[in-house]
Image (spheres, grey):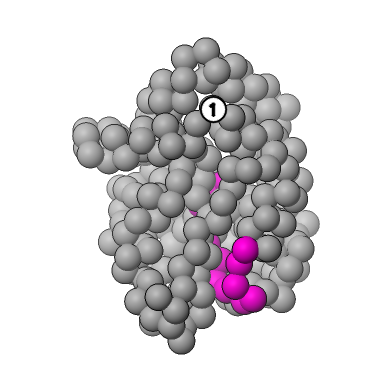
Amino acid sequence: MAGTAEPLLMVPGLMCTADLWREQSAALGGGRVVVIGDHTRHDTMGGIAAGILAAAPERFALAGLSMGGYVAFEIIRRAPERVTRLALLDTSARADLLEQSARRREVVAIAREKGVRFVQKTLLPMLVAKRALDDAALVERLLAMADDTGIEAFARQQAAIMGRPDNRPLLGEIRCPTVVVVGAADQLTPQKVAEEIRDGIAGARMEIVAGAGHLTPIEAPERVTALMRRWLGG
């Protein structure tokens, strides 16, 4: 339902769907348009960002987690005037290292052989805090998102991630109110990586989510929703 508040555009992470933002969409959607960016149809960050911008409201608050953060940087690069505020969750401003890209290619090959659910299941100890691994409903949500993504979209996402630029030079150009969120137990983009983003964006603040790993919106939904509500100004 359309409302008077600024629209909110959220971009999920790799092998995640709109369900990543289920609780935030429900809690923050009253009186505002909520849009989930489609990051599955293109194999470059530029293509993903262009597609999202074409379907997005004229101006919007922008939130991205992990890969969604990479997409958010590209959206800022292309259309900074359309972004009213920015939330970067469990992400990095750095480009892939050669060994990281090599590993991504290996993972795509494994996914083609054994399926995306198999790959997501093997990655879970890196994606969520240890306590979340005992939450059967949460684990099934993560595996179901992988199923819904599918192998071809997963391969496109990995190609886009491997080809992304180093976004650290962009940080100093970001002028909108920004919050950087990181799980205290995030192994993939830990606190020092979040600090680098915070320190590079004038006026940015950082929030650490206790007890959560890399997927904070689903691991600590109430805490992340509260942080985002404050970020949105109410």
The quarter of the picture where residue 203 lies is bottom right
Whether residue 208 sits left or right of residue 6 in the image: it is left
The location of residue 195, given as percent across then percent down, is 56, 56
Q: Which residue is mark 1?
A: 151
Which image quarter is the N terminus in? bottom left
Q: Residue drawn at (65%, 66%), measured in percent from left and top?
A: 201
Is 59 colored magenta in this rendering? yes
Region of the chain picked out in magenta, as a range: 55-67
The location of residue 229, given as percent across then percent down, is 39, 73
**Is residue 179 or residue 156 the one in the foreground?**
156
Residue 206 shows in this picture: no
The quarter of the picture where residue 141 lies is top left
**Is residue 30 or residue 13 the one in the foreground?**
30
Which image quarter is the C terminus in? bottom left
Say if 205 sits above or below 120 in the image. below
Is 38 colored magenta in this rendering? no
The location of residue 124, given as percent across then percent down, is 38, 30
The location of residue 17, given as percent across then percent down, is 45, 46
Residue 157 shows in this picture: yes
Circle 1 Cα neighbour tier, 10 Å, few/some/many (<14 / 14–19 / ≥20): many
Task: Give, as a three-letter code, the residue at label 1.
Answer: Ile
